[in-house]
Image (cartoon, grey):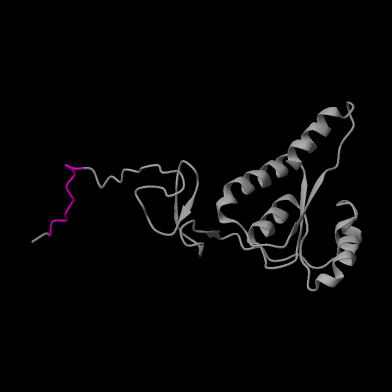
Amino acid sequence: MSLCYIHRLEKECAAGEMLSSRIMVIKSSEDNPSQYMNFMNVVFTAQKQNVVIDACVLDSDSGLLQQACDITGGIYLKIPQVLGLLQYLLWVFLPDPTMRDQLTLPPRVQVDYRAACFCHRNLIEVGYVCSVCLSIFCSFSPICSTCQTTFKFLGPPKGLKKKTKKMAS
């Protein structure tokens, strides 16, 4: 919804006027794996529109928000103590993204870009990807559990014989 609002404001800007936009996410709950595709679409749209996504995490870490902040050039910060929330919001997130280079901010987190399989939510390095909805799985399944697409797995073509080397006698 925020990207739609930003887009509307950009259309209303006078010619030659640039709008500097950003989105602030404050997270205090677990990630919802069923929203992965929608969220990644938002992240790539924000990147295309030069919208920075910042994340202030109060509870458990979020790999999705880490990726979103890294892709869009935003800041990801897990608050060590909720009592200091206001100080972190004012010190880290209030300054304009162009001013952040001049500030001493907490170091950037190392982002893990490994994908989590949609079946078990385990991080994997190699997996199977549905060509329709781009869901990632750790093992092959002939039916995608996300979009229900059926895949036909074809073996090697029939009629081809393996070449064998003849031994010279």
**Picture coordinates of residue 154 (x, y %)?**
28, 45
Which residue is more in the foreground, 30 or 87?
A: 30
**Picture coordinates of residue 133 (x, y %)?**
49, 43
Which residue is more in the foreground, 2 or 75?
A: 2
The residue located at (82%, 33%) in the rendering is: 10
Relative to 80, residue 91 above or below: above
**Picture coordinates of residue 20 (x, y %)?**
85, 42
Label total for image: 0
Relative to 75, residue 17 above or below: above
Is residue 3 rendered to the left or right of residue 152? right
Residue 153 visible in the picture? yes
- Prevalent SS, magenta region: loop
The residue located at (46%, 59%) in the rendering is: 126
Quadrant (top left, top right, bottom left, bottom right) of the C terminus: bottom left
The quadrant in which residue 110 appears is bottom right
The quadrant in which residue 138 appears is bottom left
Quadrant (top left, top right, bottom left, bottom right) of the N terminus: top right
Is residue 101 rendered to the left or right of residue 131? right
Is residue 101 rendered to the left or right of residue 154? right
Is 126 in the magenta?
A: no
The residue range painted magenta reads 158-167
The residue located at (25%, 47%) in the rendering is: 156
**Picture coordinates of residue 80 (x, y %)?**
78, 73
The residue located at (90%, 63%) in the rendering is: 91
Name the outermost residue toward the left.
169
The quadrant in which residue 2 appears is top right
Is 164 in the magenta?
A: yes
Residue 104 visible in the picture? no
